[in-house]
Image: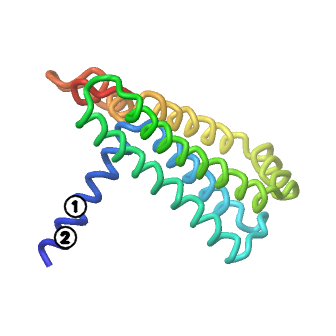
Amino acid sequence: MKPLLKSFSYAWSGLLHCLRYERNMRIHLVTVVYMYSLLFFFRDSFTVSKVELTIIFIANALVFMSELINTAIEATINLLENNYNKMAKIAKDTAAAAVLTGAVFAFAIGIVVLWQPAAFRDMAAYYLDKPWMFAILALSLAGAMTYIFAGPAAVRRLFKRKKEGGSATGKPPGENE
């Protein structure tokens, strides 16, 4: 049982690393959090079947999985190759293209399933009727953009003082975005 729990711990560590250091993973996360939150909050406005929702779940999972695999490939290549190498570039670029392909198709699936103008009108009417809720949404989007583009360390710094000795970027030494 212990090896199984340890493997979950390693997997969780990999996921957290990706969320902390990979901006594109944070973009994927924020996008799906807002999409599912709005779908839930306006569930009476959107018409989405179980099959359609399952397809959206699968598309989102494939994007997350491809981003995790891409990060693993990039880390492995960086470990093995310190200098420019054409084959390393091809491997990294191709792995990134896999993520992009999955994200584009997930976006297209989302448009096909969720493009429901009546639901968007309901959302607009709700926020026009309750401007404070729109303000909350706008503030949450500002926080989400900070999380995406500045990273989790910047968000933490907004809420507490920076401890001495830490990295100013929240990244390990030598880590680039």
Residue 147 spot, x, y in % from top left:
45, 35
Please tell me the numbered disc located at residue 9: 1
Q: Residues within 10 Å of mark 2 (few under 14, many from 20)?
A: few
Left or right of 93? Residue 127 is right
Residue 90 spot, x, y in % from top left:
46, 36
- Decide which of 137, 74 is in the foreground and name it: 74
Image marks 1 and 2: residues in contact by CB distance under 8 Å: yes
Q: Is residue 147 above or below residue 117?
A: above
Amino acid type shown at disc 1: Ser
- Decide which of 79, 71 is in the foreground and name it: 79
Residue 38 spot, x, y in % from top left:
66, 55
Per the image, the residue denoted by label 2 is 5
The residue lying at 67 percent from left, 41 percent from top is 132
Residue 161 spot, x, y in % from top left:
26, 25
| Scheme of colours in the image | rainbow
Left or right of 53? Residue 124 is right
The residue lying at 29 percent from left, 28 percent from top is 175
Q: Quadrant of the N terminus?
A: bottom left
C-alpha separation, residue under disc 1 versus residue under disc 2: 6 Å
The residue lying at 78 percent from left, 69 percent from top is 47
